[in-house]
Every structure is written in C-alpha cells, then in structure tokens.
Image (cartoon, rainbow, N blue to C red):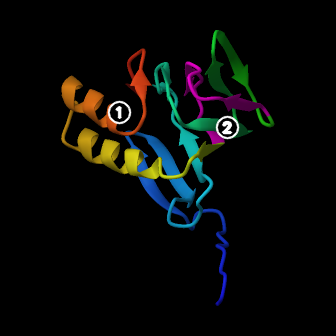
C-alpha cells in the first residue's frame, strides 16, 4: 500500500473567492483526518463578524500585512508572525480594517470546513443572502453567528 501526501507551490491550490477575499484550500478533509489548512488573502473591509463553534478549534497565523483578530474579549491588530488559537466555544472573528490585503493561514480541526466555504460562495453568488438561508448554512457547519459578516 502506498501513502501519498501533497506538495503545492504558491498559487497551485484551488479554493473560492468570497467577494474580494480569496480562500485557497491547502489541506482538506479529502487529505487529512485531523485538520484542514487554508490560506486567506483578506480584502480591505472584510470581517467575518463575531461567531463561535461548539466543536471546531481554529488557529490563525498572519503571513503578510496586518489583520484584526479577536479571541474571546481580546481584539488585536496582528502583523506577520501573530498566532491566535481559538478553542471551541470562544467568540472570535478576523477582518481587515486596513487599506491593503493581508494574508494568513487558518487551520481548522476537525477537517471539512471547506464545505462551508463552498456553500457560502454559492449562496453569495446569487446576490445578498437571505438571512434565514445564511443562518441555516452556518448552523449546518457548527457556526453560531454573533455579529454580521462584512464582505469587504
């Protein structure tokens, strides 16, 4: 039996664009039983809005630029090398209040959050999402929204 991993060069990953924010899928549930790994290029004005997950834990790691990162009651403006760990149940958000894009890695465990991004892309492609449809999608993917998403 052969065991294969994946090797990707920058720009080779597939993913989705949510308004002007790009999410590249580096490692997904198709590849790993432990986690998913995404690279975000976060557009100015984008903000996820505060939310929490009951089962998912996340790690944010800023690569370039500066991003607004919230975990619990703390919000910081973090530059390259800033790392934030978000346990299940902790309110959190990320966004970009600056004028230039920022880049970060996002690790989610368990894996599979790429399915949420795929369905969110499809929902917003039809225009401004119906709030009930958006709430239903978030509930399906263990996301309890506390404040509105700002698409940027």
Q: Quadrant of residue 27?
A: bottom right
Percent x, y of residue 149: 40, 24
Classify mark 2: residues with Cα within 10 Å, few (<14), some (14-19) or many (20+). some
Q: Is residue 146 magenta?
A: no
Q: In the shown orientation, is residue 47 left or right of residue 27?
A: left
Residue at 64% over, 90% down:
1
Which tag, 1 or 2, sits closer to the chain's start?
Answer: 2
Task: Look at the image and give the residue range highlighted in magenta.
Answer: 82-104
Q: Secondary structure at mark 1?
A: helix
What residue sits right under mark 1 in the picture? 138
Residue at 54% over, 64% down:
13
What residue sits right under mark 2 in the picture? 59
Percent x, y of residue 124: 27, 39
Q: Residue furthest top?
A: 73
Q: Nearer the viewer, residue 57 or 66?
A: 57
Q: Quadrant of residue 89?
A: top right
Q: Secondary structure at mark 2?
A: strand
Q: In the shown orientation, is residue 136 left or right of residue 26?
A: left
Q: Is residue 95 magenta?
A: yes
Q: Nearer the viewer, residue 135 or 122?
A: 135
Q: Is residue 49 visible?
A: yes
């Amino acid at each position: 039996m052969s065991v294969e991993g994946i090797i990707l060069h920058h720009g080779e990953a597939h993913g989705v664009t949510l308004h002007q924010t790009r999410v590249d899928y580096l490692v997904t549930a198709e590849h790993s039983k432990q986690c998913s790994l995404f690279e975000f290029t976060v557009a100015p004005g984008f903000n996820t809005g505060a939310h929490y997950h009951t089962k998912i834990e996340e790690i944010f790691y800023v690569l370039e630029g500066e991003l607004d990162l919230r975990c619990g009651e703390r919000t910081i403006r973090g530059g390259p090398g800033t790392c934030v760990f978000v346990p299940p149940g902790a309110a959190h958000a990320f966004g970009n209040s600056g004028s230039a894009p920022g880049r970060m890695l996002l690790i989610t465990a368990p894996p599979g959050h790429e399915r949420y991004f795929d369905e969110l892309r499809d929902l917003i492609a039809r225009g401004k999402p119906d709030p009930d449809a958006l709430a239903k999608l978030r509930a399906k993917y263990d996301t309890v929204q506390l404040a509105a998403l700002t698409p940027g």
